[in-house]
């Protein structure tokens, strides 16, 4: 049976990212450092998703962990 992620929050996390910097987005929802990975996924089938910023900008990282466009929000939270 497929393991489901924990919904960390239903709204996206708004983060100002820096061009060229890489971020590891938490896909399991268990991290205490949301929306980023703190290795709480160990022992699960989840792995962090790498995001490399192409510009200095505001990004909406998925908080519900169910986005079809991970790690970014695609408004899936509106249907949960």
Image (spheres, helix red, strand yellow):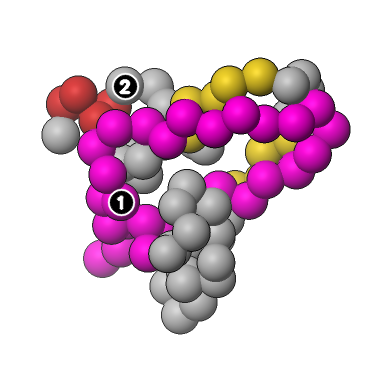
**Residue 75's mark?**
2
How crowded pointer 2 is (Cα within 10 Å; few <14, some 14-19, many 20+) is rated as some
> What residue sits 46% from the left and 80% below the top?
43
Q: Quadrant of the C terminus?
A: top left
Q: Evaluate whether residue 73 shows in this view.
A: yes
Q: Regarding mark 1 in the picture, which secondary structure is present there?
A: loop
Q: Is residue 38 above or below residue 69?
A: below
Question: In x, y percent, where is residue 21?
Answer: 79, 39
Label number found at residue 67 = none
**Residue 18 inside the magenta-drawn segment:** yes
Q: Which mark is residue 8?
A: 1
- Among the two numbered marks 2 and 1 on one chain, the one whose residue lies closer to the N terminus: 1
Q: Residue at x 47, y 30 (%)?
A: 14
Residue at 66% x, 19% y: name it.
57
Query: Which percent across, then down, holds residue 29?
Result: 37, 56
Q: Quadrant of residue 4?
A: bottom left
The main secondary structure of the magenta stretch is loop
Examine the structure image and report whether residue 7 is included in the region drawn in magenta.
yes
Q: Choose mark 2 or mark 1, whichever is in front.
A: 1
Please rate how many residues cluster around mark 1, counting C-alpha atoms within 10 Å: few if below 14, some from 14 to 19, many from 20. Answer: many
Magenta stretch, residue numbers: 1-30
């Amino acid at each position: 049976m497929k393991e489901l992620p924990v919904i960390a929050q239903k709204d996206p996390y708004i983060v100002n990212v820096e061009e060229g910097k890489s971020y590891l987005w938490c896909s399991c929802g268990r991290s205490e450092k949301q929306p980023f990975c703190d290795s709480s996924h160990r022992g699960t089938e989840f792995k962090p998703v790498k995001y490399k910023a192409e510009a200095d900008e505001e990004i909406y990282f998925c908080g519900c962990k169910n986005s079809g466009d991970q790690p970014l929000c695609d408004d899936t939270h509106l249907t949960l």
